Image (tube, coloured by chain):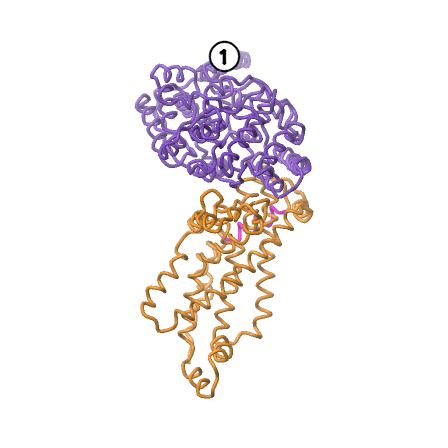
Chain colours: A orange, B purple
Amino acid sequence: MKQAAFTNKYLPYVLLIPTFVILIIFLFYPAFESFRLTFYKVNPYSGAGKFAGLYNLQKIFTNPGYIQSFLISAIFALGVVGVGLTISLLLALLLNQKVKGAQIYRSLLIWPYALSPAIAGALFNFLFNPANGLVGYFTGIRTWMTNGNTALFVVILAATWKNLGYNIVFYLTALRNIPRDSLEAAEIDGAGPVKRFFSITFAFLSPMTFFLLVMNTIYAYFASFGLIDVLTEGGPAESTNILIYQLYRDFFVNSRIGYAAAESLMLFMLVVLLTIVQFKTTEKKVYYQ
Amino acid sequence: MKKIMLVLMALLLSVSFLYAAGEQESAVVDESAEVTIEFWHAMSGDRIDLIQGIVDDFMAENPNITVEVQYAGSYNDTLNKVISASKAGNAPSVFHSYEIGTLGMINSGMTVAIDDLAAKFDMPIPWDDFFVPVQSYYKYQGKHYSMPFNSSTPLVYYNKTLFEEAGLDPENPPRTFSDIRDAAAALKKSGIDTPITWNLHSWYFEQMHCLQDAPFVNNSNGRGEELPTKVVFNGEAGNKILDWWIGMYNDGLFMDVGPGWSNHRAAFGSGEAAMIMSSSSDVNLLTKSLSEKGWEMGTGYLPRPEGADGGVAIGGGSLWMTNGHTAEEELAALKLVTYISSDEPQKAWHKGTGYFPVRKTAMAELEEEGWFEENPNYRTAFDQLLDSPETLNTAGSLLGVFPETRAIIQSKIQECYAGKPVSKALDEAAAQVNELIAEWNEVIGL
């Protein structure tokens, strides 16, 4: 088959210009700027800067609060991804059965995803706040959000719940696409439901699980600060202060521009690293059809 | 020929000098010129309409001035937007900032002091008519930088009905640290689980320094010739406050409700807590929520350690004017903020929000109307304000890194709840803040 070819050598580049203009203005230039600002001390009002070498990075690494925030983010992400994916797979399996009113359940389960993080935070605040939270009332424990450990648990729960709908939708689609004949063949060969799930269903789901793993990790690291802001403001005593929330505070509240730029550089490196690790380790174990 | 030229030049020079001198005394502006200015504020909800109404009245009085009012989000959002706009060269003529941003605004290079503008246009502001704590907060080294707008102080609110049931005198609110403690203990005995609470906010900690007439930062509480270089809240005054606060927590008298402004109100409204501290702008709201349950509410001064003789400082926000505008725009901005601080708008603002009117004449008018007989609890807040002496400490501290300092103090208080000794927590907080101050003082000079 003959491919259509551009006769004009420059036309492809001309056609690419609009995309590149947008990318440069909204992505590359800001990214470059924040990379540059990492090495500057910056006046918060005028924006005037002074080269400071590795000052900001050194500040980050000598700040015990930042190291703690790093660990908390990791625990938070592990919680959100682990708990979130397990529960949503279970719910998707249940939803995939022929039950009366499955469509209604499906819509209801997808609902939380439509909420903004701030609203989700407000809802969990109704449940767990120490003054008049429902959970506090029924359990007799009022310190859910004023104790460091339980507060982290509550924000993980809220972030997981908020993202359930997203995961369920993707798992459901993947479940629908599992070829029926493989399952039937296994059944005829005498494989039990557990064996069938782990050897066939789960294997077919692995590309989707991999995709969701990446998306949920990114969600946990980057999209959850609205929730934290509404629920705990990073407290009590910094126990829910994840990296992205600290970055938000340092830039938008504390106006420490150079320091915040260095923090964003760290987050950027983290994402690069995570992506590489995930691709390297899962490439071998993911089965693509 | 050369001589004639010389004479001409000399003449020209002298004329231009005269002109220049004239301009310095009072700027030549066309007062009736059509002018449009922008005003960004940080008050949400009903207050958006309230401010729009005040500005509409102003425009009706000054038909040549058009004011575009915009709600720009929280104080923080507003500030960030103003900074970006100022860098791009189109900052709003007037914007609203919180009190703790004052030192930053003065040093930001994007604002003009209101006293300078008032002198330029020969429109003096009657500062004597403003309440002392209100105008002294925004005065820095003898000069006012911004126009006080929404002002409040913290108050103690207590449930008179529950006080009576506990055998306490409902007409005699506790005034000192030990009064509060004793009252809380009595309430606890009468069956109230957690008698007192307030939200986790560094504001109370700061205010209790003012009550002790103790500085919060060095260099004349941040108001001296030099920028502050150290915080001093880890001294005797700070320890006294937190020892009392954490002590009540440890003894089960105080309930930790976390940060934010709703939980402590809810606990008070449900009768779970019989006493709270909150902003004086909550008077309406709390009176209402208690009367729904058939309870009566009382108010008292912010408690102080025994023998302390300071007063409260004002909290809230003020209106700032930015530079880089034409003389006509500057004049319009000055007229706008002066109008907003005048009696009628201030009375409407007070009734609509619970913030203080900033002027004594406005208060006198409210008194004449019988407003305080209908709303006796506002009287407490006013009296507390009037009883405050004017010193650099009671004026409130100025600090460039205030938002971050508050976050650090609050975090350390939470560590104290979890068992860290007060003096250690305060020393750690001070060390952290001092590092930030050193950095801020360096970058602000860039």
Depth check, front residue: A266 or A31: A266
Q: Which secondary structure dominates the residues rendered in magenta?
A: helix
Depth check, front residue: B356 or A43: B356
Q: Measured along the vertical axis of the image, is residue B147 above or below residue B38?
A: above
What x and y, as percent, mark residue A133?
45, 46
Q: Measured along the vertical axis of the image, is residue B311 above or below residue B417?
A: above
What x and y, as percent, mark residue A218?
52, 58
Residue span colored magenta: A27-38
What x and y, as percent, mark residue A227?
48, 50
Horizontal side of residue A273 vs B131, given as left or right = right
Residue occupying image coordinates x 49% and y 47%: A231
On the image, numbered disc 1 is attached to which residue?
A: B18
Q: Amino acid at mark 1?
A: Leu
**Total numbered labels:** 1
Task: Check if residue A30 falls in the magenta segment.
Answer: yes
The image quadrant that residue B304 belongs to is top right
Q: Secondary structure at mark 1?
A: helix
Chain ID, mark 1: B
Q: Measured along the vertical axis of the image, is residue A105 above or below residue B366?
A: below
- Residue B323 seen in the figure: no
- Residue B136 seen in the figure: yes
What x and y, as percent, mark residue B312?
53, 23
The image quadrant that residue B74 belongs to is top left
**Crowdedness near tag 1: few (<14), some (14–19) or many (≥20) residues, C-alpha within 10 Å:** few
Depth check, front residue: A253 or B440: A253
Task: Check if residue B254 falls in the magenta segment.
Answer: no
The image quadrant that residue B425 belongs to is top right
Horizontal side of residue A162 vs A63, given as left or right = left
Split into 4 quadrants, where in the image is the C terminus of chain B? top right
